[in-house]
Image (cartoon, rainbow, N blue to C red):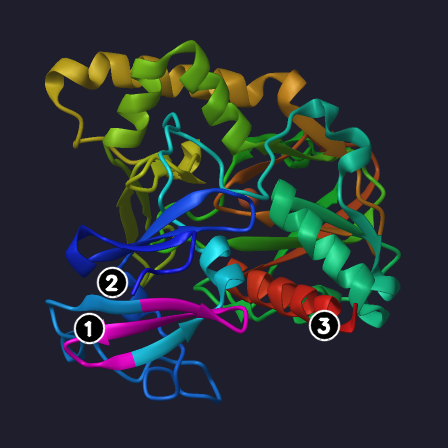
Amino acid sequence: MAEPAGLEIIDDGRAIALTLPDGSRQRFHAIWLRDNAWDEATRAPGNGQRLITLGDIPADTRIGAATRDGGLIHITFRPENRTIAFDPAWLASHAYDTVVTRKAGWLAPGIESWDASLGDRLPVADFAAVARDREVLAGWLGGVHRYGFGKLLGGPAEPGALFDVVGLFGYVRETNYGRHFDVRTEVNPTNLAYTGLGLQAHTDNPYRDPVPTLQVLYCLENSAEGGENMVVDGFRAAECLRDENPQGFDLLTRYCARFDYAGSSGVALSARRPMIELAPDGELRGIRFNNRSAAAITDVPYEHMADYYAAYRRLGEIIDDPAMEVSFKLAPGESFLVDNTRVLHARKGYSGAGSRWLQGCYADKDGLLSTLNALERQSRKVA
Ligand code: FE2
């Protein structure tokens, strides 16, 4: 029997070709379709988890029949002789039959790189509003996901309030520095040793594997002169390096740097990871950049080391370029959240009478993205 128009069994039953509502023709393999079945014998109805392994599906699975009925595609798999319904809309949103040519360092959908011109798009929200209103929270978390950075204003100037920021979306990551750490220097103008030196933009804790993927810095006091915080998008810096020196970019992605920390007793952390990390298909996944904890680089072959160092130097220059930075001075009760796998942060020098006290802690992106996705699904259901 001939299949209806737009649905065809091809390659001797190893695949189907389906014309989707947008007119595109997409091929789907029999083994892929069978593995992605949503019938009750394949997926648990409650939690949606898969009940079978790939080994439970015959290796020679083929499509015996394919029909459209009631808006669904019904596919009969051989040799199991099992007929399973597929939603064409689900197939359309999971189609993989496309030729994708992307240059190394491409950004995942929903991620946008930025420089000093970020300006008005900077995700800023009111502390009380994100705690009270799920939509405001979703909007702010969405901005943090897109730009790797966000600010909260108008919170209480109380020690420990940073935990309420993390509680909006996830959990604190405790480290050897404790559940939180205090960044506090009493400024004494009679003692220039304590004038608060600036710090080059960096990602935190590159000597951990995995690194803490989020950091919160929460301001409790900030009456000193200077002491602004600034952030730089490491993804934009990597893109700039790639566009002006593809070979240098390639070296920083291909070879691992090393990072160490053994600054307190009983602690000897080390990690071996590239400064610019790509997924196997070239997606830009992470940046590790921290001059204070960079260890001897021993994984770059002799013939590439000089070029590696030139690329490392140039990446630092791009990061230090004022055209890349967004800076701001936090007032008591204000805080910011950075994606520590992407956005570098820095503190400018500070001096004069007054005090500066920030509390910081780490958390993780999986919790943030889970909360964001759940909030967005919920709001789609309501709509
Ligand atoms: Fe830091």
- Image quarter in which the N terminus is found: bottom left
Question: Mark 3 belongs to which amino acid?
Answer: Lys
The crowding category of the residue bearing disc 2, from other C-alpha atoms within 10 Å (few below 14, some 14 to 19, many at least 20), is many
Residue 259 falls within the magenta-colored stretch:
no
Q: Is label 2 in contact with label 3 (beta carbons under 8 Å)?
A: no
* Any part of residue 329 in sight: yes
The crowding category of the residue bearing disc 3, from other C-alpha atoms within 10 Å (few below 14, some 14 to 19, many at least 20), is few
Residue 285 location, quadrant? top left
Q: Secondary structure at mark 3?
A: helix
Q: Give ligand 1's quarter of the image.
A: top right
Q: Which residue is mark 1?
A: 54
- Residue 92 or 370: which is nearer the viewer? 92
* Any part of residue 160 in sight: no
Q: Which residue is mark 2?
A: 30
Q: CA distance from mark 2 to mark 3?
A: 32 Å
- Residue 314 or 290: which is nearer the viewer? 314
Q: Which residues are magenta?
A: 66-82
Q: CA distance from mark 1 to mark 2?
A: 13 Å
The secondary structure that most of the magenta stretch takes on is: strand
User: Which label was assigned to residue 77?
Assistant: none
User: Which label was assigned to residue 381?
Assistant: 3
Quick check: 98 above or below 67? Answer: above
Q: CA distance from mark 3 to mark 1?
A: 32 Å
Q: Nearer the viewer, mark 1 or mark 2?
A: 2
- Residue 203 or 21: which is nearer the viewer? 21
Q: Nearer the viewer, mark 2 or mark 3?
A: 2
Q: Residue at x 44, y 81 (%)?
A: 48
Residue 200 location, quadrant? top right
Which is more N-terminal, label 3 or label 2?
2
